[in-house]
Image (cartoon, grey):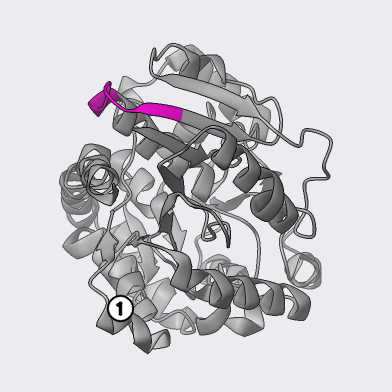
Amino acid sequence: MIVGIDARKLNNSKTGIGYYTENILSELLNLDRKNKYILYMDDDHKGSDKWGCYENVSIKVIGRNIPKNKIFSPIWLNTLLPYHLNKDKVDVLFCPNFFPPLFTKAKRITTIHDLAVFKQPECYPFLYRIYHRMLLLLTIRKNDYILTVSQSSKNDLLETFKHLQERDNIYVTYCAVNKGKFRVKEELDSNFNKEVIEKYGLDSKYILFLGELNKRKNILHILKTFKLMIDEGFSEYKLVLCGKEGYGFDEIISYINENSLENKVIITGYVPEEEIPYLYANASLFFYPSLYEGFGIPPLESMASGVPAVVSNISSLPEVVGDAGIKVPPYDERQSFNSIKKVLEDQNVYRSLRIQSLDQARKFEWSISANLLLKLINKSV
């Protein structure tokens, strides 16, 4: 059998979906040496050699000169990709980034990570909302199997698209973390740890957030809670915001400037993936009060690093952190502050959360999700 993979998210600046694609694909290829896999990319990517070491895997770059943006992405997906799928006689196509092509003879398995544009529309620009909704409405019926990354996102899917309740073709493939990569501070390279600390000026205790700096991630709530911390005497702490700029970033900068937090808030921009484990491991606490998540990998990465996580009590996040994380309402700064204060001041609470966090992170395994994906691939034809 020939299996195609839309591998465009395996690019040089991976974010959540890119890490999902990389990890589930790695486990899938370790499990399956029988089927032939073709990774379809739209450019040459750093790390492509990693996939070339598998005898049953080939990489095909198509449309290298097509601009990489939301206008041309559907064109690549619905013209170039179907042409090559047909030419290569692909039996099954796995699309890990929301949308399959509209027309192809191949069976389609697609991961729909979340329904944020339906659940939190105000967090996105108007044109993006229209674009994303339209593509989802056009393609969702085209899938032979749909994967979600949590029970919460599956429930959202069934609630929003009620016709899917008639089809028994939606499966949960949980995300996980690379446990060899995310470890407690004592197990990391001490020399590289010093380099990372010096690079970002982390010369004091800090609260960490990692993710795109946009409205959906509720960054203003983080800043307001942190301002409350400073006002209540936690002046030895800094706030570190790691991630690229997103929708609503101007409001974030305005709040920092208006409240004289320039010397207390560090904005790193996009962080190379080899540095991320060190930023987690050195943090006092991870704060992730997102307004909506399909899964929420960063809190799990934090817990795998032995760092307690405070998250919002909505969408998939309670499912991810279980009893090992502190859950707070995403609009109540006082309650967020009180929860953070308790963790930072009570060493017994901190130690207990640290142990529970490590245990919770171990419950999620990429191999489980990859096994399910392989079963669906083999079942498709």
In which quadrant of the rendered view does residue 378 lie? top left
* Residue 237 position within the rendered picture, expressed as x and y whole percent measured from the top left: 53, 52
Residue 244, position as x, y percentages in the image: 69, 50
Rendered view: 203 above or below 173: above
Q: Residue at 50% of width from left, 60% of height from top?
A: 234
Q: Report the magenta residues as a range.
A: 30-37
Query: Within the image, what quadrant is residue 256 found in?
Result: bottom right
Is residue 76 visible in the rendered image? The answer is yes
Identified at 25% across, 66% down, the residue is 319
SS class of the residue under badge 1? Answer: helix
User: Residue at coordinates 70% horizontally, 73% vertically from top-left?
Assistant: 131
Q: Residue 104 or 7: which is nearer the viewer?
A: 104
Look at 26% across and 69% down and name the residue there.
Answer: 151
Disc 1 marks which amino acid? Asn
Asked if residue 31 is among those painted magenta in the image, a careful observer would answer yes
228 within the magenta span: no
Instruction: Look at mark 1 in the image and give the residue it sits on.
Output: 155
Looking at the picture, tell me which residue is in the foreground, 159 or 275: 159
